[in-house]
Amino acid sequence: MLRGLILLIAVLVAACGGRATQSAETPHAASVLLITIDTLRADHVGAYGYARARTPALDALARRGVRFEHAYATAPITLVSHASLLTGLYPPGHGSRHNGMRIDLKVQTLAEHLQRAGFATGAFVAAFPLDRRFGLVKGFRDYGDEMPRDLSGHVANERPGQAVVDEALPWLERHRQERFFLWIHLFEPHAPYGNPEDPAQARRPAEDRYDDEVAEADRQIQRVIDALGPARESTLIVAAADHGEAFGEHGEIGHSLFTYDTTLRVPLIVAGPAIPEGHVVDAPVSLVDVAPTIAAQTGTPAFDADGIDVTAVINGAAIPSRALYAESFAPLLDFGWSPLRTLRAGGWKYIAAPKPELYELSADPGETHNVVETERSRAAQMADRVQAISSDRLADARASSDPEAVRRLQSLGYVSGGGDRGGSRPDPKDRRDLAAAIAKVTSGELQGNALERALRDILRQDPGNPQANLRLGYVLLDNGSCEAAEPYLQAAIDAHLPSADPYLGIAGCQADARRFAAAERTLREADRVEPDNPVVAANLGIVLSDSGRPADGLPYLQRALTLAPDLHQARFSLAIAYARLGRRADARAEAQRLLDRLPKDAPQRPEVERLLTSVR
């Protein structure tokens, strides 16, 4: 009875608020479950023909719904692609052209659209590029984006899919009897694959470890689908990737640099009450089609978008003739190279670059034979169409100026800090070896001596690269060589890397040498570069306390704990500072709070217990 009432309301809303693609007799979906899997290649999913796949949840979903054989992202970049999926707009329309670049907040999101139609809206994401500060929170009543901290207090930039689903399932339980829109984002297939620090794992091929992570994402998808319970029959389920991943194709490692189909083609599977079972759509579609299609499938008013409602195509109609756009401005914003803009139409694909490319996809799906010289008229026409959608410049748009955001994106392998250097820009194709070397480093796949060699090779080609200097500095610090590390950390500072990390490395060396005044100056400069970084505040408090000024250190340690209550080293140092001042009761209280917060098996517990005993 309740379900029938909900469906009746959906039909009335569609009739009163705008056109709907389906007739009133067609059952609309009562709710929507959107699952996005980061970095998932279509050709590593069983339903797409991968013989070694371990994706039973996605494969079963394809059997009971429709699989789009040729679905494409609008950018090989997490935030940009998700923004297109959730707004139905190409990147020039929603304004996010790279990770860290917030969407235009005037743009309507699918969550806002469904919330206005009475849906409960919740999102739970697995990685920092989708943090609420970048705008995709719009329309979601609940937005789970809190990342865990390690024992030193540093915030992680990603979290396991199991943790995402663990947080999402109680939300689903609370709202399962309502119309709901639930978005779950899983990060597992993103590099590094598995734990490359484990020698046994590191010896395995990267693609095998990638498949392990795809399998884990699939397990979490099954948990969510199972949790739908009876609501499953009335729920539209959409599963998609934001982009693919390259394992050396076209000289690329990872994603974001090039716009070949290796990283633009994505799996897209849709199942629901009005979706035919086991159907395959061969026509090319884009992730901008998802939002208008969901609006139609739920019987809500038409969703204004660059994409189209593909319901008719799902039901066997021919797709209208149109062009699909994609881009990557990562080469420009990360390295100062030329961006790439792409148009797909009539079986052809054009890539606007200093050395343009044109491919006849039916004869050359691997995009290996550039025919731009023999198809000059076609290439010129497509170049004009690309230019009408977007120029190769960004005007005033730039990636996030928030230093903490930039630092966290850099640690995930995005945003090298090169920026737009002006002048004539190199074609990314001519820098692919350097880009591949950088990608191997930022992926986390290299460790130990291999990592140091790779960083030194990058710096031979690009001596001013701030991220390579920073990372090599920390490799040398980990090897116990402050003297060797400091020049590289200083080079990162000189390159204006918007991060406190190089200052923290240098200050650590200065403090170890008991050059406390120099360490204090360095940390105060770090605080200027990255205000309210709790690790900087904690280190400043520690340096002041260790230099014989514990009273001066107290405010900084307290500030660090206000910003990050689980910054355990700051709490331990605060207890020591209190003990040095003779405030034994305060020292006992902080030491006990720390013990209460530490896991039972934490290696720091004996040291904290010794401190607690000494101040009793």
Image (cartoon, grey):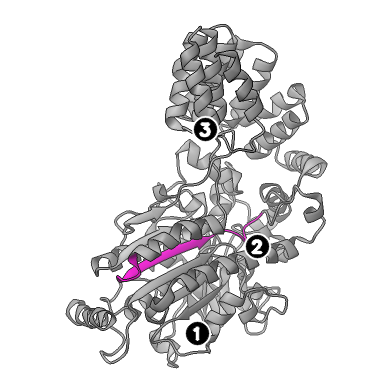
Query: Is the Cβ of the residue at disc 2 closer than 8 Å to that at disc 1?
Result: no
- Label 1 sits on what residue type? Val
- Label 3 sits on what residue type? Asp
Is residue 544 among the parts visible in the rendering? no
Query: Is the Cβ of the residue at disc 1 closer than 8 Å to that at disc 3?
Result: no
Give the class, few, some or many, for how many residues have Cα within 10 Å of label 2's Cα (few <14, many ≥20).
many
Residue 170 found in image quarter:
bottom left
Question: Among all residues in the image, which is located at the extreme left?
Answer: 16
Q: Residue at x 47, y 79 (%)?
A: 270
Question: In the rendered structure, which segment of residues is drawn in magenta?
Answer: 175-191
Q: Which of labels 2 and 3 is toward the front?
A: 3
Measured as percent of width and height from the top left, residue 249 is found at: 71, 66
Residue placed under numbered mark 1 in the picture: 66
- Label 2 sits on what residue type? Glu
Residue placed under numbered mark 2 in the picture: 213
Q: Considering depth in this image, is 222 or 251 the residue closer to the camera?
A: 222
Measured as percent of width and height from the top left, residue 127 is found at: 52, 52
Residue placed under numbered mark 3 in the picture: 596
Q: Secondary structure at mark 2?
A: helix
Q: Residue at x 54, y 33 (%)?
A: 499
Q: Quadrant of the C terminus?
A: top right
